[in-house]
């Protein structure tokens, strides 16, 4: 089945220790998104890719970076995680169709100690 | 202004009864889409139902229906015959198309608890 996969599902890191989260898709969608979701809150868009074009949200901290080496894969790098970065990180994809939903991965729960 | 407003932080419903989750939106884009997602405690966002701004009829998907009132800018989700497995967080979202991608705006969510 076509899907969006995220690894790892759970990640624990130390304060200040870089961490990378990965996302892959078999849907061949042009657009990939990274969201941060803190407990009991709405998902917050960090950035998105349209093919290889990277688009940062204005309020995304510089601490968050992303790479998309090819259509299928996208990575979220947190260079120096702080305690406030503890959250669920959701990867999603979408086609360019106006009627299509976003397709979400299962998420990575990140805990910064 | 908020793009998507969900005014019910939490709702309770008795098993087998119907429940309505409220959602209002704000946009000047004439072509937009409205979505509802379910998020169980496991964290995965599950797509439930879609309504396009030009759709004349309310969307239905099994036990889910969307009460779309365009003039009032509301898109309420109706779940009929609630089941215990419906207990979850529910998010209303709106899609606007900006240049070359679809941007999705999410409401703050409603936590639904289904009582046996």
Image (cartoon, coloured by chain):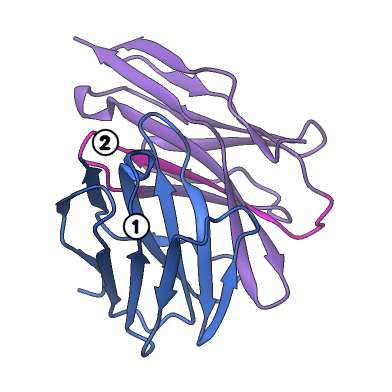
Secondary structure state at the residue bearing disc 1: loop
Q: Nearer the viewer, mark 2 or mark 1?
A: 1
Residue B40's label in the rendered image is: 2
Q: Is residue B6 left or right of residue A93?
A: right
Q: Is residue B71 left or right of residue A22?
A: right
- The segment highlighted magenta reads B28-45
Asked if B116 appears above or below A39 in the picture, the reply is above
Secondary structure state at the residue bearing disc 2: loop
User: Image point 42% across, 49% down: which residue?
Assistant: A36
A112 or B78, which is in the foreground? A112
User: Image point 43% across, 80% down: which residue?
Assistant: A29
Residue B25 image-quadrant placement: top right
Residue receiving disc 1: A80
Tell me which chain appears purple: B
Residue B34's label in the rendered image is: none
- Residue A51: percent from left, percent from top: 51, 86
């Amino acid at each position: 089945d076509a899907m969006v996969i995220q690894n790892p599902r759970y990640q624990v890191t130390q304060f200040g220790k870089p961490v990378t989260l990965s996302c892959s898709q078999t849907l061949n969608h042009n657009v990939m998104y990274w969201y941060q979701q803190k407990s009991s809150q709405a998902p917050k868009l960090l950035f998105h890719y349209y093919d290889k074009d990277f688009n940062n949200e204005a309020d995304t901290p510089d601490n968050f970076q992303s790479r998309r080496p090819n259509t299928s894969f996208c990575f979220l790098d947190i260079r120096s995680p702080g305690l406030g970065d503890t959250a669920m990180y959701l990867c999603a994809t979408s086609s360019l169709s106006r009627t299509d939903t976003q397709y979400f991965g299962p998420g990575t729960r990140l805990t910064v100690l | 202004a908020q793009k998507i407003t969900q005014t019910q932080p939490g709702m309770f419903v008795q098993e087998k009864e119907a429940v309505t989750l409220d959602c209002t939106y704000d946009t000047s884009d004439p072509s937009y889409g409205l979505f509802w997602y379910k998020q169980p405690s496991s964290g995965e966002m599950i797509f439930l139902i879609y309504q396009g701004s030009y759709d004349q009829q309310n969307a239905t998907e099994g036990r889910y229906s969307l009460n779309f009132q365009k003039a009032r800018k509301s898109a309420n989700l109706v779940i009929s015959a609630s089941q215990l497995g419906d207990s979850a967080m529910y998010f209303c979202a709106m899609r606007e198309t900006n240049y070359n991608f679809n941007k999705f705006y999410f409401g703050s969510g409603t936590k639904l608890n289904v009582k046996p």
